[in-house]
Image (cartoon, coloured by chain):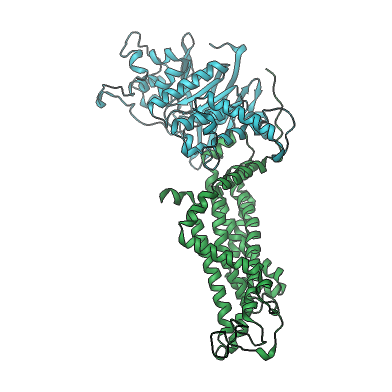
Chain colours: A green, B cyan
Amino acid sequence: MDITPPITKPTLSLIHSWRIRLKLWKRSAKEFLYDLLIHPTALIGSIIVILYILAAILAPQITVHNPENGNLRNRFTPPAWEKDGTWEFPLGTDAQGRDLLTRILFGSRISLIVGGVAVGISILIGSTLGALTGYYRGKLDSIVSRFADLLLAFPFLIFAIGVMAFIGPGITNLIMALIFKGWVEFFRLVRGEMMSEKSKEYVEAAKANGMGSLSIIVKEILPNIINSVFVLGTLRIGDMIIMEASLSFLGLGIPPHIPAWGSMIASGRDYMLVAWWVSTFPGIALLILVLAINITGEGLRDILDPRLKLEG
Amino acid sequence: MINTNNTLLEIRNLSVTYPTRRGEVKAVENLSLTVPAGGRLCLVGESGCGKSTVLHAILRLLRPPGRITNGELLFRGRDLRKLRAKEIQGVRGKEISMIFQDPLTTLNPVFPVGEQIRESLRLHQIIPGLSLPWPLDIIRRKQEKEIVLKAMQEVGIPSPMDRYSIYPHQFSGGMQQRALIALALVCGPALLLADEPTTSLDVTIQAQILDLMLKINQDHNTTIVMVTHDLGVAAEFCDTIAVMYAGRIVEIGPAETIVIHPHHPYTRGLLTCRPHIGEKAQQVKPIEGNVPDLTHLPPGCAFAPRCPLAQTVCEQGPVPLIQVEKNVLTRCLQPVDNRRDPSWTWDQIVRI
């Protein structure tokens, strides 16, 4: 009997299984939308988030004012429904006479970009490290896990303040400071899931079928845990936005001339008694966005987690 | 006993140990087996006697810290122990396949069954020629899908076209096991390792799956090594039975001889503790005692502490495999022969 030579693996096979995954998503899109429709909080949350995203994209089209330069003659104009208010400035103006609505709309850009990018990169870093360490364990696992424990020992805000004070303000620096700790949660989630999935029989069967360990991680196990990463990611976007606002509030995040909710709240603090709206409206905008993101995340958890679905 | 020119798999002096804090667990010790091409061999024994470990050792799938400490695993003349990681990956699934006890957990829950079978084809590049990246491989995908459908048809999955994109949990247990067999066979392996393939199925489905495996064995000349704790299943399915106890083979021979005229008291005990329909529970005689601690095996026969026939000589030194009749080897110094004492017959043993 002649012996067949060892197999060389096709390099693009990794894409293949994810293509199936995409097809799966496409097919279950109908089901997903149905689940979303009958899940009221997720529906409301996602509609609000979509509205925020649209507002952020279309901000220059929605308003006529300049977000960075105001007219000092218009300073502290109250909201339109108050005495002395005017519909030219629906939510009033701030100390520099800039339209608050315009600044809130432009500020949502910062919040969404910072939240989205910080979580996106955190997912990439955290999942990669978590998948590798959870599957292979060994020395790398101990090193990365101890480092993650070390990072978790610091309160997030104090840690971020320290990092920002060290590397200076700016959007890129802010995102970097958030990622510097943000990846840990994804790392721990993926590592834990990887360790529990790894001992399941389908992984053993994949090995018995001749699959290499990297293929098993990417093609067999990751599709099984990607939903939890998704849900956590959604919830973390809210946290990241809060964190960005906190840092901006403290003057360590976004430079003051760029409209960001945190710095807007901070700038209105001194005029709370004479012009309550300067701080209040950015605060409400922040509150509603984070609330919407969080209930969307909770809803996604209900919809995407098959274990919950089976029980329900 | 076995035609050596025709040997597909030969295990020589295989030893597997699991180091633990209490000492080394000798899961398999000095096990030698020869499996002829096209043969059907059953490893039978209680839980923890090392029968599954043998299968895992053949494919080098032992969970750490378990490792093979000694022996050769000759498959088509190659020692599987000496293969590099890449080479053994090419053997797994293509030349030697394995099916497992619980088909549902063995299939990946998030992919359609048909796609999982096709993945195996792609992995082992069964269709020759250039492998194009995803959007361009339409022809290859079509060819692969056809092979998968044929394989699903062959294992008795009705209307495979509709079942191709169904998820594992939507299959019944029997269908899942059929799908798993299709997955194992799609690359045309020479050897199929089956780890208790019928244990999680109900009896009627068990019979169907055994029939299917028998058909595969006959149609494709696929050699099958099956692990089971059910002597009835083994008697019905196999041509050779190897009874294992505490990591060693205690009796090996043709299935009918082993089941009708067992020589080892342990085999005999396994047979008498099988319940039969029409028999009251009191009539089933379990083997007294427990499996010995694998870290501290007795110096003599491992079964001696539980054996009703044990003599002092049994406990003194290691017992070799002794040829008691043509083709039958027994690791016993007091072999029994029920031809002089026919307490039960073939009819009672084979499953009803």
Residue at x-position 68% and y-position 79%: A65
The residue at 67%/75% (across/down) is: A253
Q: Quadrant of residue B264?
A: top left
Q: Pick the quarter of the image with the N terminus of chain A.
A: top right
Single out the residue that lies furthest toward the right: B130
Name above or below for residue B195 compared with residue B259: below
The one nearer the camera, A223 or A81, is A81
Answer left or right for B142 relative to A287: right
Residue A287 appears left or right of B293: right
Q: Position of residue A277 (x, y in %)?
A: 56, 84
Residue A190 position, x and y percent, is 57, 53
**Which of the 4 image quadrants contains residue B246?**
top left
Q: Residue at x 61, y 33 (%)?
A: B118
- A81 w.r.t. B347: above or below: below
Q: Residue furthest front?
A: A87
Q: How many marks?
A: 0
Q: Is residue A206 above or below residue B263?
A: below
Q: Position of residue B338 (x, y in %)?
A: 35, 11
Q: Is residue B53 visible?
A: no
User: In this orientation, does residue B239 appear?
Assistant: yes
Could you say where residue B90 lies in the image, as x and y percent from the top left?
Answer: 66, 30
Residue closer to the observer: B212 or A173: B212
Query: In front: B152, or B210?
Result: B152
- Which residue is more in the foreground, B31 or B347? B347
The answer to whether A311 appears left or right of B168 in the picture is: left
